[in-house]
Amino acid sequence: MKYVPFAIIQAAQHYDPEATGFVRRHFAGYIAYKALSPFLDEHGRFHNLPDDDLCYEAENALFAAMGRFRFREPPADFSL
């Protein structure tokens, strides 16, 4: 899994257009996967189709979460 760089998270927190677009693109595949809804066709087979409303709501929640994110100092015993 790739991570979003810290500098981009900081810029997205202040609603920088490029940074928010980067974060949105980073999570687009995950949001699309989680927004699949089962659909039963006329032959009785199930298909998973993307639900646009769920995608829209998830993207709005992601955008709102960007502004609420708070940074903290790591604990004293933290090491990379």
Image (cartoon, rainbow, N blue to C red):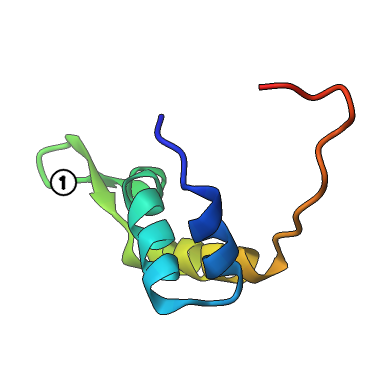
> Where is residue 21 shown, x and y percent of the image?
37, 67
Left or right: residue 76 compared with residue 47: right
Task: Judge whether 15 appears above or below 2 on screen.
Answer: below
Q: Quadrant of residue 48?
A: top left
Left or right: residue 51 compared with residue 6: left
Q: Quadrant of residue 61?
A: bottom right
Residue at 81% x, 37% y is: 74
Q: Nearer the viewer, residue 16 or 7?
A: 7
Quadrant housing the N terminus:
top left
Residue at 17% x, 36% y is: 44
Residue at 43% x, 58% y is: 23
Q: Which residue is mark 1?
A: 41
Task: Judge whether 25 appears above or below 14 on screen.
Answer: above
How many marks overall? Answer: 1
Q: Nearer the viewer, residue 9 or 1?
A: 9
- Would residue 61 be seen by someone viewing this image from the given angle? no
Q: Nearer the viewer, residue 54 or 75?
A: 75
Q: Nearer the viewer, residue 52 or 66?
A: 66
Residue situated furthest left in the rendering: 43
Residue type at mark 1: give it. Asp
- Would residue 13 be seen by someone viewing this image from the given angle? yes
Left or right: residue 12 compared with residue 55: right
- Judged from the image, the secondary structure of the residue bearing numbered disc 1 is loop
